[in-house]
Image (cartoon, helix red, strand yellow):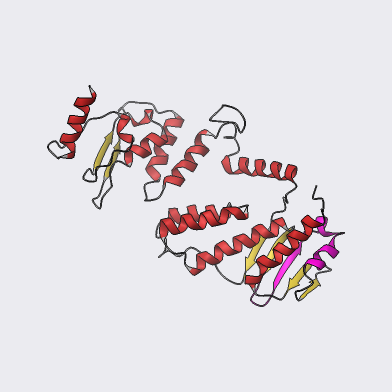
Amino acid sequence: MSPKDIQNNLELFLSKDTDLLVASSIVESGVDIPSVNTIIINNSHLLGVSQLYQMRGRVGRSSKSSFAYLLIPKNATLTPESRNRLKIIEKNSSLGSCYSVALEDLNNRGGGAVFGYQQTGTHTNVGFDLYNSFLEKAINNKTGESNVVCNISSYKKPYIPENYIPSSKTRVWLYKEISSISKLEKIPPLKEKIINLFGSIPGPLSDLIFLKSLEVWGSRCFFFKINVQDKHTDLFLDTFFWKNKIDSLISALISYKFILIEGGNVVRIKVEEKELPSIFINIYNGIKNDKISIN
């Protein structure tokens, strides 16, 4: 079909002179017609996840209810990969599920080689999250960053309110996003993404993100546990690291009220929780300035 014929047919469809448009997968590329509420995708098992997701996105672009039908031949035997692709599209049908779709697709086919041209495979046996964890630890060993895993507990009970994000799937996605943060610089972009998607961040969710930032600081400062209470905070030391370096820690905390408990393995600081980031900065700078080896 010539470009002119394609344009004429599309204009007839846009003007509602015809109710049905038969097209190839080219419609995935930015066609925006709010009045369209149904798409039928034939031989959907032959298409990739991103193609299916983009095609499904051609409908439901207004307040009208929309439907996407993914057809496969009656007697077709689907490969495990094809079945997984269709399942990803089927279960991620809520608004804003694009990230979940991309992550599942990545986990399903693999992300390829870190260095090289292979764009799929390599880590499907262990899963993307575990692979990423292995990679991050290896990089930290080379760059001199801490590999201590810090756990945090608090007298507060932070959570994502249901009236803020009604979808349980989306809440699980966001919990996973926050839980996976391992670097402080990832927190501002995540907060910006949350505000853009859902609006102003409510108190309980803000507390959750703040506690996650303290957990990241704890890992950087070689604390394996942080217990935040109303009147004080307990820092549980990684004794392997701090065994012969306690003087450096005391120097960093000299301007704060603190005591050593549990045989010197826990530091109890009497400060408000909003002061904790500044304290962690002092401790971390002390580690860097003293050129303490962490290998």
Location of residue 135 with respect to 42 vertically, above or below: below
Q: Residue at the right extreme? A: 244
Taking the spot 36% from the left edge, 38% from the top edge, the residue there is: 54
Is 244 part of what is drawn in magenta? yes
Residue 265 visible? The answer is no
Please provide percent x and percent y for residue 106: 51, 38
Taking the spot 55% from the left edge, 67% from the top edge, the residue there is: 207
Residue 70 visible? The answer is yes
Location of residue 237 with respect to 35 vertically, above or below: below
Please provide percent x and percent y for residue 253: 77, 69
Residue 49 horizontal side relative to residue 6, left or right: right
Q: Residue at the top extreme? A: 1
Residue 165 horizontal side relative to residue 284, left or right: left
Instruction: Write down the region rendered in magenta.
Output: 229-252
**Quarter of the picture holding the N terminus:** top left
Please provide percent x and percent y for residue 34: 24, 46
Location of residue 86 with respect to 66 vertically, above or below: above
Question: Who is closer to the viewer here, 97 or 3?
Answer: 3
Residue 260 horizontal side relative to residue 118, left or right: right
Taking the spot 18% from the left edge, 35% from the top edge, the residue there is: 11
Labels in figure, total: 0
Please provide percent x and percent y for residue 295: 80, 47
Is 41 part of what is drawn in magenta? no
